[in-house]
Structures are given as structure tokens and as C-alpha cells.
Image (cartoon, grey):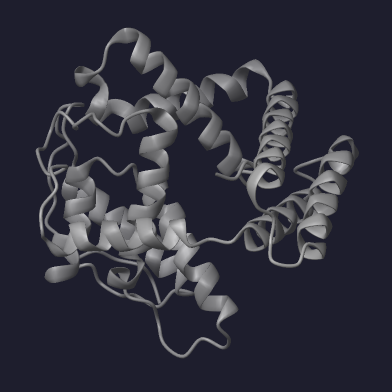
Amino acid sequence: MGCGWSGSATSRRPESRVDVPEYCREIEAYLCRKNDGHLIRVVGPSFERVSGWAERGVPIKVAFEGIDRYFERYYRAGARRRPVKIDFCEADVLDVFDEWLRATGLTAVRPASTTTLEADSSAEAQGFAAAQEHAQQKSLPHHLQRVLSRLSSARASGALDERFDILIDRVAAELDHVKAKRGGVRGEARAALASRLADIDRELVTRVQDQLDERQVRQLRLEADEELTPFRTAMSPSAYERARDAAVERLMRARYNLPTVAFS
């Protein structure tokens, strides 16, 4: 079944604003692909929900990543029984958006096109809080297992070459170390482990950056600029440069399916 969207056509708005119907159309099409072609329309309450993401300034690729995260859990739960509605993905979308805001240093910045980032008691705000609580409950062994799985997958797909084997081995060794500790890793040992994981993470990013040519770097920067457009007028030049560097790194991770090895 082909993907579609029932919203009316609209002209492209200025860069400082979000084309909400187009945003919802892209979300619907992406959900259609994730549901193996089964069309679940983004209309009514679902349209209002997704419109809220656009007005908050959630970049479309960040929303896609949140949808992916929900589907990952859905597949792990066993055989699929019915197509996924976009409403089910909101907590994960807002979770990923929160991570993006923190990574780019934008937690205190409001998009130029909206005032909806203010805290309230709406369903969206409640979903945001639930996503944050879910993130806080992640265990260290689960984190390391997920990191190792994604690194191994990237290596098997050819995204990472043999030069990355030593990093994968180091993550595997840390996972074995954590599993061997009854009662978990605590105190100074946990702090030391977090430091080692941060070092591995930085080395991973540096090695992947070294693989990129000028054209790839330029494309990532253009994509980062597009993501940051709703926030740009509220930022100083130096803050924007820092945010763009962080956005570029995040896009690079997504392109190579790289996990964040660091754990806090």
C-alpha cells in the first residue's frame, strides 16, 4: 500500500518558521515505511500531536530516530500484531529530542517560531517527563550491551573497518567487567568506568571524523544548519557554532549507526 497524507497543500514558510503540514506529511510517510507499507494517517489528535513536535522545534531526523527507537523495542517484544500508531512513539521522540537539546546546548533556547517549549501540564509535557524518567532508569549493563550490538552491526555492515576492532574489544571487556561484579559497579569504580567509556566514545568519534572527506563534512554541516534553523536567531554566534558542531557529530553517528559509548 502506498504512503499518503491527507493534509492540504501549503506554501513554504520563511526559514524561521516550520512548515507544519509538510512536517506531518514526512512523519506519516516515514511511519508508513516502518509499518511495511501499512498507512496510518496522521490526522485529528495525531496531527495535533505531531504538529506540537514541529512547533517545539523537533528536527525531522530526530523525530525519525525516536520512531526508530520505539520500533526497536516493538520488535524485541516479539511478533508484531498490528501497525504502530504515531501516538505510541511520542515518548521516544521527545526522549531523543531531549538528548539532542542537551547535546547541542539548546535546553534553554526557544525556537523563533513558537513559544510551546514552556513547561505545562499538557499531554506532551507529561510524555516528555515520562521519556526523561525512562532514560534515567537505563542500567549500565543494558547500555553496554546495546553499544556493543550497534558497534558490531556497524562493523559487519562495513560502515566501520578493521581499525575499529580494538574499540569494540574494549567495550566488550568493559561489559564483561560489569557483569562479573555482583551488586553492580559503584562509587569510585563506577566513576572510573564512566571516564573510560567517555575516552572510548571520543576516540570513536575522532576516528570516524578522520574517514570523512570534504564533501561529506560539508553535507553534514548543511544538515546541521537546517536542524538548528528554528533556534538560530536566539543564539549568539559562538553558541551557534558549538551547537552546530554537536549537531554534526550527532548526524555523523546516525549516518554510521554509531552509539554513544559514554554513560552518565
Q: Quadrant of residue 179?
A: bottom right
Whether residue 71 sits left or right of residue 146 in the image: it is left
Quadrant in which the C terminus is drawn? top right
Question: Up-down: is 187 above or below 44?
Answer: above
Q: Residue furthest front?
A: 187
Residue 258 visible in the snapshot: no
Q: Quadrant of residue 89?
A: bottom left
Residue lying farthest to the top in this orientation: 237
Answer left or right for 233 relative to 205: left
- Count of marks, rendered view: 0
Q: Is residue 225 above or below residue 174?
A: above
In the image, residue 24 sits, relative to residue 262, either above or below, namely: below
Q: Is residue 30 above or below residue 109?
A: below
Could you tell me which quadrant the N terminus lies in?
bottom left
Question: Residue 19's x, y, as percent?
Answer: 18, 42
Residue 98 showing in the rendered view? yes
- Residue at 75 percent of width and 67 percent of height: 182
Q: Nearer the viewer, residue 6 or 231?
A: 231
Q: Which residue occupies 12% across, 44% down?
A: 116
Q: 120 or 12, which lies in front?
A: 120
Instruction: Please state if 160 lies on the left or on the right of 131 as rendered.
Output: right
Task: Please give the name of the residue rendered at 89% of the width and 40% of the height, measured from the top-left corner.
Answer: 166
* x 11%, y 37%: residue: 114
Which of these two is toward me, 27 or 203?
A: 203
The spot of residue 122 in percent (x, y) is 11, 61
Q: x, y (%) of residue 247? A: 46, 30
- Going by the image, does 83 lie left or right of 53? right
